[in-house]
Image (tube, rainbow, N blue to C red):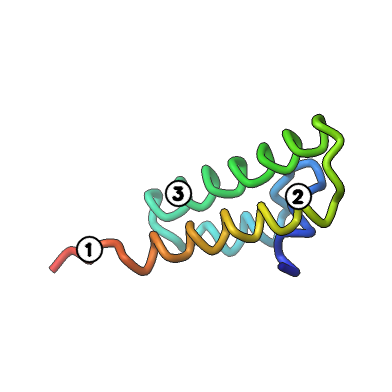
Amino acid sequence: MEASWHRGKRYRPGRELARRQASQPPAVRDRAGRGNRRRNQLWKQFDARDKRPTIAAVAVARELAGWCWSLAAMDEPS
């Protein structure tokens, strides 16, 4: 829930994030970036429909939980 509250802001990766991502494989950076943009877009859609911020935060948290599950369920290359 706490992480979902931060998705309401405009998505702008900062210098610290860029520094940490530099050591990650391109596929990981791409998946993380797409996930962040998707959750930010979801928040914007709720905001455009005048949904309460708490409702938007719960929906974004649910999306984040599903995304984390998909990471855990991915097949690791052997």
Left or right: 8 in relation to 31? right
Label 2 close to label 1 by CB (< 8 Å): no
Report helix, strand or loop for mark 2: helix
Report helix, strand or loop for mark 3: helix
Left or right: 56 in relation to 39? right
Amino acid type, callout 2: Ala
Q: Is residue 14 above or below residue 40?
A: below
Residue 51: percent from left, percent from top: 83, 41
Distance from the alpha carbon under mark 2 to that under mark 1:
31 Å
Residue 5: percent from left, percent from top: 79, 59
Q: Earlier in the sequence, mark 3 or mark 1?
A: 3
Q: Which residue is mark 1?
A: 75
Instruction: Give the image quarter of residue 16.
Output: bottom right
The N terminus is located in which quarter?
bottom right
Q: Which residue is mark 2?
A: 56
Instruction: Give the image quarter of residue 46.
Output: top right
Q: Is residue 53 above or below residue 41?
A: below
Label 3 close to label 2 by CB (< 8 Å): no
